[in-house]
Amino acid sequence: MIKAGIVGGTGYTGIELLRLLVQHPAVQLQAITSRSEAGKQVSELFPNLRGHLDLPFTEPDVETLAACDVVFFATPNGVAMKQVPALLERGVRVIDLAADFRIREVGVWEQWYKMQHACPELLGEAVYGLPEVNRDAIRQARLVANPGCYPTAVQLGFKPLLDAGLLQEESLVADCKSGASGAGRGANVGTLLCEAGDSFHAYGVSGHRHQPEIEQGLSMMSAGGVNQLTFVPHLLPMIRGIHATLYGRLNNPESHSLADIQALYEQAYANEPFVDVMPEGSLPETRSVRGANHCRIAVYRPGNNDTVVVLSVIDNLVKGAAGQAVQNMNIMFDHPESEGLGQVALLP
Amino acid sequence: MIKAGIVGGTGYTGIELLRLLVQHPAVQLQAITSRSEAGKQVSELFPNLRGHLDLPFTEPDVETLAACDVVFFATPNGVAMKQVPALLERGVRVIDLAADFRIREVGVWEQWYKMQHACPELLGEAVYGLPEVNRDAIRQARLVANPGCYPTAVQLGFKPLLDAGLLQEESLVADCKSGASGAGRGANVGTLLCEAGDSFHAYGVSGHRHQPEIEQGLSMMSAGGVNQLTFVPHLLPMIRGIHATLYGRLNNPESHSLADIQALYEQAYANEPFVDVMPEGSLPETRSVRGANHCRIAVYRPGNNDTVVVLSVIDNLVKGAAGQAVQNMNIMFDHPESEGLGQVALLP
Amino acid sequence: MIKAGIVGGTGYTGIELLRLLVQHPAVQLQAITSRSEAGKQVSELFPNLRGHLDLPFTEPDVETLAACDVVFFATPNGVAMKQVPALLERGVRVIDLAADFRIREVGVWEQWYKMQHACPELLGEAVYGLPEVNRDAIRQARLVANPGCYPTAVQLGFKPLLDAGLLQEESLVADCKSGASGAGRGANVGTLLCEAGDSFHAYGVSGHRHQPEIEQGLSMMSAGGVNQLTFVPHLLPMIRGIHATLYGRLNNPESHSLADIQALYEQAYANEPFVDVMPEGSLPETRSVRGANHCRIAVYRPGNNDTVVVLSVIDNLVKGAAGQAVQNMNIMFDHPESEGLGQVALLP
Amino acid sequence: MIKAGIVGGTGYTGIELLRLLVQHPAVQLQAITSRSEAGKQVSELFPNLRGHLDLPFTEPDVETLAACDVVFFATPNGVAMKQVPALLERGVRVIDLAADFRIREVGVWEQWYKMQHACPELLGEAVYGLPEVNRDAIRQARLVANPGCYPTAVQLGFKPLLDAGLLQEESLVADCKSGASGAGRGANVGTLLCEAGDSFHAYGVSGHRHQPEIEQGLSMMSAGGVNQLTFVPHLLPMIRGIHATLYGRLNNPESHSLADIQALYEQAYANEPFVDVMPEGSLPETRSVRGANHCRIAVYRPGNNDTVVVLSVIDNLVKGAAGQAVQNMNIMFDHPESEGLGQVALLP
C-alpha cells in the first residue's frame, strides 16, 4: 500500500483527489490537512464522501506528513515551495498540483506569480508531470510538478504536429474554454452562479499564468521554438470540463492530407492509456470525460485551408489536476498506470 | 461471473446500466440490444464508454438473451411484458426497469398506463425491487420490478414514520423535484435546453403514473392505509437528481420529539448500505449523490408545529433506476450487495 | 417627473431597480449611492446599462437624497432604519426593499433579525407594500415596506382561499423554490456556480426570516389566524424565479369544486394588473415571468383529495423586489400602476 | 402605425419578434401565421405574452398578409422564397429572417442549402440587412435578407480592421460560441437539456452554412478578398448569446499599437446606436446583451504578438435575429432606428 497525504484538502482539486484516492485499491490515506477545518470530519464538509472516508482534517504537521510515502499539495500557489524541502529531506516524494515547480526559469516564474520563489534550487530537479512527455523522468522523480489544466489540454493537442515539425510556429492559436471549477472554491463574486451561470466571456486576454507554462512545454516539442502562441481562455457556464480549440497553419499544406494527420495522431498516442484519438469527424464533448482521466482529441482541416484545427477535451479536475496526479503517483511507485483511474465519465 | 444482457440500451437508464456494469467486477456483458442502433458500436453513441466497452448493439433476439443469467429491460413501458415470459421459461432471471410489473392490480395498471397488460399472471409473482423493503423476496425472485425514481425517494423517506404508525395518514404531502433525465432521451420540445434549462415548473399535478406505485408501497408500510397522498412532481433545470420534500402530521405531536424521530430513522436504516440518515440539521444536496447509489435523508420538525418534514435525495438514474437494478442483481445472485456500486458521488 | 434616488445600488435588487427606472417614462434618476463604488460609473459595474445611464455612484449623503421625491433602499437589513427618519423629516417618501419595516411587532423583528431596531416608532406607520392587499394605504404612505420575495408569492397564492375562509388553517404548507439571486450578490461559497449550479437542496428548514412576515400577512387575511404554516424554502440551480407550491386542506371539501375555486381566484384578481390567474390545467413556469412584474397562478385539486394545490410564480427580483417597488411608487405618486412595468418576460 | 405580419410565429425567432413588436410603439400586429397552431391563442403557447397580446395564430394566407405594410418570415430555410414574390407584387415589403436571400450567388446558396432556389431573380435585389454596412440600401429595399447570428457577430467584429486593410487575410480565425436557441425550437436529441445542458463541444467544423455568408460579407469589406477564413462554431450550455473570438495577424504589426486599433474601432462605430466599443481591457459578457439589441466589442493585442484579438458579443435572438429585423424595419419605414429597441439587457 502507498501511504498518501494531502496538504490542503478543502479546495476542488483536494476534494477530487479524495474522491479518486478513496477508490484506489493500493492507497492508504494517512492525513489530510487544512488549517481552517482542522478537527472536522472530511465527510462533514463533503457529504459525497460519507460512508467512504472516516478521517478528520488535521493541522499541517511535518511529522505526520513524513510518515507518508507521497504527499500531494492541493494548495494555492506559493504554499508547497515552503514545505517541500523538509519533506524531501525526510524521504517523502511530492506531487505539487499548484504551479510552484512548473516553470524552469525562476525569473519567469517570479514575474508571472508575483512573489519570490522559496526554493529555486529545486526547479531544476522537479519533473514536469505530463506522462505523455516525461514518463521516464516521472518514474524516478522525488518531486513532480503536476501540469495546469489548460496546459494539459493544449500540449496534448499540439504535440504530434509539433513533434513532427509540421506547423508554422508563429501561427499557433489556442482558444480555450473552461468550467468554473478551474477558478477554485474561494468565495468570489465573479464565479457566483448569478454572475457566471448564464453567461460566457473571455478573461486574461492580455496575459494568463498558463501562457509561459504552455510555451515552455511547446518549445520542448518543437525544433524552432514557439514564441507567438496566442492563448485566450474563456469561462464556461458549467462546472467541469475544458475544451481547447487549437489552430495552426501547415508549413506544407499540400504534403499533409487530413488522413495523414489523423494517422499521425493515432500513432503518436497508440499506447497512451489516457489519450483517446477519436475517429475522423468526431466532435469531442466535455461531458465524455466528466469525472474521467481521459483526454479526447479530434483533428480537422476545414475547407481548402492550410489550417489544422485540433479539438482537445479534458475534465480540468481529473486529467487537468487530480487524476493526472494519481497517474503520476502510479508511475512513481511502479504501479499500473491506470490503477484506480477506471472511472467511466458520467454521461448524461 | 454473472452473464448479463440489456434490452434497450440507448436511453438514459440503459446507458447508466452500462456505466455501472462495465465497472462491476463480477459481470460479463453478453448483449445490448437496440432495434434502431443495431450494428453500431455502443461507444460510438456514448463516447464516455470508449476504452471501456467493445460491444455493438444487436437486434433483440431471444436466443442471445437466453444465454444470459440475467436480463435488464431498460425499455419504454409495455415492452418488457411482451418478452419476459419467454425469457423466464428459458431460465433467465429478469429485472425490469420500466413500470410493467410494479403495480399488483392489473386494473390499476391498465388505467394509468393506458394499455392492456400482456402477462397479468406474472404480476403476482413479480417482486417489487426495493431492497430496504423486500430484500428476502428479491433474493428468490425470477422477476424483479425495479421501482420508479420518485417512488424510491418517497418510500424510503416516509418508511420509518409509517412503519411506526406515527403519521395522520390523510395528511401526507410529497413535493418532489426531478432533474430532466427522468423524462428520458426522446426528442421532446418540453425538455430542450431552451425550454427547461432556465425555468422551473410543476407537472402531472392532476395525476402522475408514480402516484399509484407510491400509494401501493406506502399502504404496505402502514396499518391504516394511505389514501390521501398529495403528490406534486416538478421539473428541475438540471440533469440528475431527485429531491423529495415530504410532509406529514404527527398523531401525537407531544410524544415524539425531533430527537426521537432522528433516532427512529437512524435505527431503521442502521444496516442499510445505501440509505444514509444524516445528522440533525443536515440539508441533503442532490449533488451529494450524483452518480452514486445512495439515498440521503434528513428529518425536521420546524417551529412548534405538529408537522414532520423529511428531505430525501437520490440520483434518479442510480438509486432511482440503474444502481438499484444492480443492487437487486447482487442480491438475486448472492453477491455482496454493494459490489460494483462503490462510486463516490461527483462533487463538484 | 418623479425624482428618485437609490441607496445601495450594487446588489441585485439595486441593479434591477436601475434596469426598471431607466426605462420608466416618468422617473428622473437623481442619485445612486454606494460607499464601496463611489465615483465609479454605474455602467462600468453593470455593462448592460451602457448607453442607458450616465451616472456615477456617489457617497450616501442626506442632502443629495433630500432633493428626491422618493428614495429606494436596496440595502442589507438594518441600514434603512438608520437613515429613514431623517429623510421622512425632509419630506422624502421612502420605499425600503429590505426587511426593516415589514414586521409590525418590534419584538418579533428583533428576534428574527438579531439586532435592535433603530426606529420602532415607525413600524406602526410603515405600510406593507403588497398592492393587492394594501393599495389604498400605499397611496397615502410616507414609508412603504416592500414585501419579501417568498412572502409575495405565498400571500398572493393563498389570499383568495383564506379571504373566503375555506382552509383548515393548521394544514398550510408552503414548499418554495427560489433562484440564487435571492441570496444576493455577496461573495459566498454556497452560491458559487460550482456549489449551486448543478444541485438542489432545502435550507432554513428550522426557521427562515420570511416565516413571520408570511404568517403576519396570512393572519390578516384569515378569520381564525394562521399559526401552523409549514414553510420550506429550497435553492434552485438558476438565477431568477420563485415557484411556490402551496397546500391546504378544505374545511368542506364537498362544497367546493375545482371550478368553484378557479372562479374564486379569477374573481379575486379580476382587476389586478399584475396577478394572472391562468386557465384550469395550466402549469406556471418561472420563465413566463422572467424579467416581468407578473405573478402567475394556477389552482388544482388533485385526486379525490380534500387538498387544494396552488402554484404561484414570480420573478424574485421583479414582483418579488424591484418591480413591486416601482409598482408601489406608481401608486404613491398617483401614476398609472403599470407605468414603466410593461416588460414582456424573456422567453426563451 | 406600421402594420406588420409574421409568418411562422412558433419558433424562437418568431416568439422573439413578438416580444419586441408588442412593445413597439409604432407597430400594429395584424397577423401571425402557423400551420400547426392555427386557431390557438399565441399567448397559450407563449404564456409570457399573456396580457400583452390577444391574437390567435392563423393559417398562412396571402390576402391577410397582403394587408400588411411589412411581413417578417421567421420560417425554416426554403419557405420564404416560395411566398415572397406574391407579397412583393402586392406591394408588401419583406424581411426574411431565414437564409433564403442572404447569398448573392445562387450556385453557392444551392450547394450549402441543398435545395433549388425558387426565385433566384430576387437575389440581386435583396438587400443584406446589416445596417452598419448597408443602411442606405436597406432604406429603399423591398426585400431585406436579415443576417445570420454568427455572421452578424463576426462581420461587426472584423469590419474596422478589414475596412482599413490591416489584416493578413489568409490568417483570419473566427472561434464562435453560441447558446442553444440558435438551433431552434424543434424537438432534437442533441439540444435536450440532458445532452447540451452540462457540456461543451464544437460542431460543423468541416463546414457550416454561415461560412459562405460570412466570407461574402468580409470580402466586400476587404480589398484583397477573404479566402481562408477558418470558422469553428461551438454549442454553449446556455440559451441565449453568441461570443465570437476573432483572430487576425497584422500586415504591419509595428505600425499599429493597441491604442491605434482601439481608436479605429471607436471611430468606426461612433454613430452606431447598437454597436458598443468597450474601453480597453473590457471583457464583453454575453449577459450584457441578453434580451438587448447591442453588439459589444473589445479589442486586444496579447503579448508581443502580431495578432489582434477581437471579442464580439450579441444576443443571437436579438441583434442576431429579431432585434436586427426590427432595426431594419425602422430604417425601411423611416422611423427612428432605435424605436422599440430600448430594452436593457437582463442582468443578472
Image (tube, coloured by chain):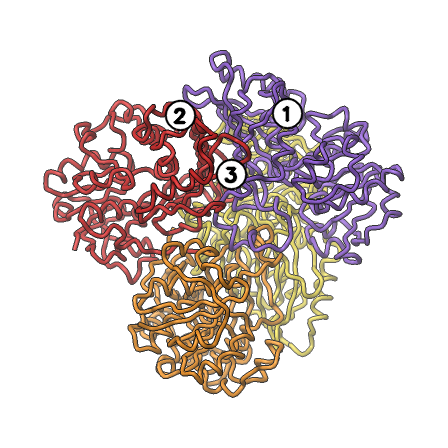
Chain colours: A orange, B red, C purple, D yellow
Residue at label 1?
Answer: C219
Badge 1: residue crowd in 10 Å (few <14, some 14–19, many ≥20): some
**Relative horizontal placement of residue C210, taking residue B194 as reference (left or right):** right
Badge 3: residue crowd in 10 Å (few <14, some 14–19, many ≥20): many
Q: Amino acid under label 2?
A: Glu
Q: Are marks 2 and 1 in contact (CB under 8 Å)?
A: no
Residue in view at x 29 percent, y 29 percent? B220
Using the numbered discs, state the Cα–Cα distance from disc 3 to disc 2 in whole angstroms: 29 Å
Q: Amino acid under label 3?
A: Phe
Residue at label 3?
Answer: B200
Q: Is residue B103 visible?
A: yes
Task: Please state the chain letter of the residue tagged with numbered disc 3 in the rendered image.
Answer: B
SS at circle 1: helix
- Compared to D147, does A232 lie above or below? below
Task: Please state the chain letter of the residue tagged with numbered disc 2 in the rendered image.
Answer: B
- Measured from the top left, where is residue B238 in percent x and y? 46, 46
Residue farthest to the front? B255
Mark number, residue B169: 2
Badge 2: residue crowd in 10 Å (few <14, some 14–19, many ≥20): many
Closer to the chain start, of discs 3 and 2, is 2
Q: Are marks 3 and 2 on the same chain?
A: yes
**Relative horizontal placement of residue A139, taking residue D204 as reference (left or right):** left
